[in-house]
Structure formats: structure tokens, C-alpha cells
Image (cartoon, rainbow, N blue to C red):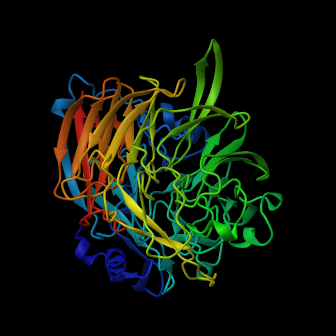
């Protein structure tokens, strides 16, 4: 199997990501979507039903959704790799996926003989892979419309699966369903008009035959929403705007944004979802949107069946710093709090703290100790001229941007990545112009002057106790090339935590102490989040991570590598 003869790979290569003012656009590429089959007969028939999806977090042989389970724990119950033997973890193989654009995705794995991995990367490219051999079984590239505008790269972060179908969001604000045995397109549904600035980059999630997806375009003055689609037909079942009409003043809601551009978290017990809500619009000019702009820069809960609003919480009301809430919410059950037990929704946000909310009411239980530094925090941008600058930490990339946290049941801790880099903000007045950026200001990255208090570390990786908010440990990470750390973490049943750095190192930590136990270096940054599974046919536990930079805000050189590590019993 030679990827140089793969028409779907070539189609993805032909799509040019071109940088424009305040964003990116796509140029070239195929007129129609392309599927290339290689060895589809090797894909075993496995009925991925609701029971498998609900149990995947407890099944060491599968990883059937982006977050590892509905609660977004990003944890595996595979226990072959331990703190005592992780030093012997070996690289099984490196697979060039052939399309070296944004590499922020997390693969999913359907168990079988052999297991089948579904891997995605930008621009809207998916592969079915035999993960034992590192061989591609089919490839697919979606044909996005020419001229799609994107604020922040051509990302695709993962897939969802149900029955005979695998699903991926598309950059023009859609969802595509593929036959998972052949790679052939089954249906495509548009959830919004991409010419208005909408897009989609996250992995969807499925429960009881319904696929849940969100909205992106918060730099284009859109109106955010969450949508539920019938997984069989693609028909939209409901679509709920994130901004309640009675919470906004005048016409400000029309372009108030509040998009939901990472994978929702599902609470099967309460039959609700939790999702982060991003920035208000315009990002930096609060004068045109008086009030708290609820529930932007926060968390909301919606009923799974109807989309009805349940509760909301804000970590940065009336935000003018681009402090979105973005990262997937982590649902931690039965947390012991003063002798009682409660379910907590942990939101790790750009503000540089982790917020523990009561899953039932949304009330704040605890705010963690600070993860990154806070310098000039909440300083208002001078609404005077573009020459006025306010250096602040964390800058607009966070704290915690989209990077998914993990929760380790073995340690009881949540693990988070927070940026710690100074930026300058400036204000400018902008008229809304549909389909064009609507920032109301801008960023200087890096800041023109670094605050004296800044410690020089660009990122912090930390462990937080969700019961108390205590920061149990923190690893300050300095960048060799001033690059942001841009991926999330993976927890294991044996108390390990894996994560990749902007310096190209995949690191295994002792989850309790924060001690680095093992590292493997690559030549390019790791901007993705690792995952793991156990293959009984090979009697090995595997850890996989995509390797390669992402384009937005200095993520470093790109790559096209899927790296798979293994350890036998």
C-alpha cells in the first residue's frame, strides 16, 4: 500500500491552507469528496451498539469516542503499562498519514481481530487503519467549498462511531457519515451557513442514535448553537441557540457568538449534556454588548432529548480578553465533599483556573488554585486608540484553550494544560460585516514588553483535586522555540498520565507526584492528545499520538506522523 498512489491523500494535499488577515482560507482541492480503498476486507464486522458506547470507558480493548467515555475522562482501564515498567515502553511504528496539515486529532479504536482505528487530521481527512500493522485500509477526503474562512487552522480532532457508520465534522459547518467498512459517503448535513463564518473542527459524540455537534465561528459575529442529528439519516432533530434572548441587551445578541466548539460531555444518569461556551462577539469590544453576556465564557447544560436549557455558569462575565471556555467539561461522579457525595463538572478554562460545578444545579462548588500565573488579570483594554497596549498573563490562548483535560480514577485527580505567556491586547472599533472577522481589537503575540513578574515558562501542566480545588502538583514547561503546548493528556488505570509537549516530547508522568518517568522525543511538536487500548490478539497495550504542529499562534513546524507505542504482558 503506497500512499503516493492514494487519491484521497492526494486530494487532501491539493487543498492549500492560505493565511489571510485575521485567519485562514482554503484554496484548491477536489470538486467532490474522494474515497480510496486499499484492503477493506480486513475490517471485521463488529456491531458498535449503544451498550458498547456506554461501556467503552471500562473496556480496555476499545476507545470508541473522542474523550474515551461520555464523561470525557480520557482514561484507559488497560493496565499493562505501569509506573514500574513504563521505562521499557517502545515505539512500535510511525505511520506517515501523508497529509501534513493540522495534527490535533485523537484516533478512536473499534475492538476486533484485528482492531480498527479511525484517524482524522486536517483538512477533513480520515483513514481506517489496522493498528497492529500500521497499514491503511481506506482513506477519505471531504471536499470543502472553495473560500471557507477559518479563524484558527483547518483542524479536525476526531471521529464518532455507531453501528456500520463513522462520523466526522466538516470545515464548512457540517457532519459527514461514512460507511466504516468501505469509506464511502452515506450522508452529509450542513448545520449552518459557512459563508456567514460558521465552521466545525471537533469530534461529534453519539448516544441513543442521536449525534451531538456544536458551532464555531466566534470571531465572525455568528450566533452559537448546539445541534442534535439523527445518526442514521442526518436529519436535524433540534438546534438550540446558546444565548437566551432575555439575557442580552437590544440587538447585541444577533452577533453575540457564544459558540460551542469542542465535543460535548454526556451525563447518562441525568440525560443531559454539558458543553463549554466560547467568547462573546466581538471579542475585545465590550461597548457594543453591555451586561454579563450570559452564558459566554462558561458552561451550559442541555436536555439530551429536547435541547432545553438546564443551567449555565460563567467564569468570565462580559469578557473582553478572549477568555473562552473551550476545553471539554469533565464529569466526575461521587466526589466526597464534607462527608457527602456529589457529581462535579470540572471546567478548565482560559482564565487560568479550574471550576468545579455541581452537576445538578451548575452552582460553583470550588475554584481551583491558580494553574498559570495571573498578571494584569482583568485589566480593561484602554478604549482610546490602537496604540494603547495592555500586556497580560494568561494571554488570549489561555490558560486552558481547547486542550482536553483527563481524569484518573486511580488518583482521583484532573490533569490540565494551561498556557502562561504574555500577550498585548488593543482595542479598535469595527462594524459588523457578515462573513468577515469581527474582533473589535487585536493581539500582539508575544507582548511588546514582558512583565517583570513573568516566570519565563510558556506552559504549566498540573494536577487538581476536584473535591477541594487543590493544585496537587505542577510542571512548568519552557519552550525551546517559544511554542505553545497544544495537546491534551491521557490517564491510565495504573496511575500514569501521558502528554505531549511543544518540544516534541511524549512524557509519562507519575499521576500522584508529577515525576517524569519516561520520555520519547520527536523532531516536531505534539499538538494532539494521546489515547490507549489493549489488543488481546497481540497481548499488548498500545499508546497512540499524532505528531506534528498546528498553524495557529506559533505551534511550530508541521508533520504527518501517527506514532504508536506498545508493551506486551
Does residue 227 appear left or right of residue 501 in this picture?
right
Vertical position of residue 181 compared to residue 377: above or below: below
Q: Quadrant of residue 367?
A: top right
Q: Quadrant of residue 223?
A: bottom right
Vertical position of residue 407 compared to residue 244: above or below: above
Q: Where's the C terminus, which quadrant?
A: top left
> Does the rendering let one see residue 56?
yes
Please name the residue shown 28% across and 64% down the image. Answer: 97
> Does the rendering let one see residue 183?
no
Image coords of residue 422 (percent x, y): 36, 56
Between 518 and 364, the residue placed more toward the observer is 364
Between 512 and 522, the residue placed more toward the observer is 512
Does residue 568 appear left or right of residue 392 in this picture?
left
Between 218 and 425, the residue placed more toward the observer is 425
Between 268 and 18, the residue placed more toward the observer is 18
Please name the residue shown 34% across and 63% down the image. Answer: 447
Amino acid at each position: 500500500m503506497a500512499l503516493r498512489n492514494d487519491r484521497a491523500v492526494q486530494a487532501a494535499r491539493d487543498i492549500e491552507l492560505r493565511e489571510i488577515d485575521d485567519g485562514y482560507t482554503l484554496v484548491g482541492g477536489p470538486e467532490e469528496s474522494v474515497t480510496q480503498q486499499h484492503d477493506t476486507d480486513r475490517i471485521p464486522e463488529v456491531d458498535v451498539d449503544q451498550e458498547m458506547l456506554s461501556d467503552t470507558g471500562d473496556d480496555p480493548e476499545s476507545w470508541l469516542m473522542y474523550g474515551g467515555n461520555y464523561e470525557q475522562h480520557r482514561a484507559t482501564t488497560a493496565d499493562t503499562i505501569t509506573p514500574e515498567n513504563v521505562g521499557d515502553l517502545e515505539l512500535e511504528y510511525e505511520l506517515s498519514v501523508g497529509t501534513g496539515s493540522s495534527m490535533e486529532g485523537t484516533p478512536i479504536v473499534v475492538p476486533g481481530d484485528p482492531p480498527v482505528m479511525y484517524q482524522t487530521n486536517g483538512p477533513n481527512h480520515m483513514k481506517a487503519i489496522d493498528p497492529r500493522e500500521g497499514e491503511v485500509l481506506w482513506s477519505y477526503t471531504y471536499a470543502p467549498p472553495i473560500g471557507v474562512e477559518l479563524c484558527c487552522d483547518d483542524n479536525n480532532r476526531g471521529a464518532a462511531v455507531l453501528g456500520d457508520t463513522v462520523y466526522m465534522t466538516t470545515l464548512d459547518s457540517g457532519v459527514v457519515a461514512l460507511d466504516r467498512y468501505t469509506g464511502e459517503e452515506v450522508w452529509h448535513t450542513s448545520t449552518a451557513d459557512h459563508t456567514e463564518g460558521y465552521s466545525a473542527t471537533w469530534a461529534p459524540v453519539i448516544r441513543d442514535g442521536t449525534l451531538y455537534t456544536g458551532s464555531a465561528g466566534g470571531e465572525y459575529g455568528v450566533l452559537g448553537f448546539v445541534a442534535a442529528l439523527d445518526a442514521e439519516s442526518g436529519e436535524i432533530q433540534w438546534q438550540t441557540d446558546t444565548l437566551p434572548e432575555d439575557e442580552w441587551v437590544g440587538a447585541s445578541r444577533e452577533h453575540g457568538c457564544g459558540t460551542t466548539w469542542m465535543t460535548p460531555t454526556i451525563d447518562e444518569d441525568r440525560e443531559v449534556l454539558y458543553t463549554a461556551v466560547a467568547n462573546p462577539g466581538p471579542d475585545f469590544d465590550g461597548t457594543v454588548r453591555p451586561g454579563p453576556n450570559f452564558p459566554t465564557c462558561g458552561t451550559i447544560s442541555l436536555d439530551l432529548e429536547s435541547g432545553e436549557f438546564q443551567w449555565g455558569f460563567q467564569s468570565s462575565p462580559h469578557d473582553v480578553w478572549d477568555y473562552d471556555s473551550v476545553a471539554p467539561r469533565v464529569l466526575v461522579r461521587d466526589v466526597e465533599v464534607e462527608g457527602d457525595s456529589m457529581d462535579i463538572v470540572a471546567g478548565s478554562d482560559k482564565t487560568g483556573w479550574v471550576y468545579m460545578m455541581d452537576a445538578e444545579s451548575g452552582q460553583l462548588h470550588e475554584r481551583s488554585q491558580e494553574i498559570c500565573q495571573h498578571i494584569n488579570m482583568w485589566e480593561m483594554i484602554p478604549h482610546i486608540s490602537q496604540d494603547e497596549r495592555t500586556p497580560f498573563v494568561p494571554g488570549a490562548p489561555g490558560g486552558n484553550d481547547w486542550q482536553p483535560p483527563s481524569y484518573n480514577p486511580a488518583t482521583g485527580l484532573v490533569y490540565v494544560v494551561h498556557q502562561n505567556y504574555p500577550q498585548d491586547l488593543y482595542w479598535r472599533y469595527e462594524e459588523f460585516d457578515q462573513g468577515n472577522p469581527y474582533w473589535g481589537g487585536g493581539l500582539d503575540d508575544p507582548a511588546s514588553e514582558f512583565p517583570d513578574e513573568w516566570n519565563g515558562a510558556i506552559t504549566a501542566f498540573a494536577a487538581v483535586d476536584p473535591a477541594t480545588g487543590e493544585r496537587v502538583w505542577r510542571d512548568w514547561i519552557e519552550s525551546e522555540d517559544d511554542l505553545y503546548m497544544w495537546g491534551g493528556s491521557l490517564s491510565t488505570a495504573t496511575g500514569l498520565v501521558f502528554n505531549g509537549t511543544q518540544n516534541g516530547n511524549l512524557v509519562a508522568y507519575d499521576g500522584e507526584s508529577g515525576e517524569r518517568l519516561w520520555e520519547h522525543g520527536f523532531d516536531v511538536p505534539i499538538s494532539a492528545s494521546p489515547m490507549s487500548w489493549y489488543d488481546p490478539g497481540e497481548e499488548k497495550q498500545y499508546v497512540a499520538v499524532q505528531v506534528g504542529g498546528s498553524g495557529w499562534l506559533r505551534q511550530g513546524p508541521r508533520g504527518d506522523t501517527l506514532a504508536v507505542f506498545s508493551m506486551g504482558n
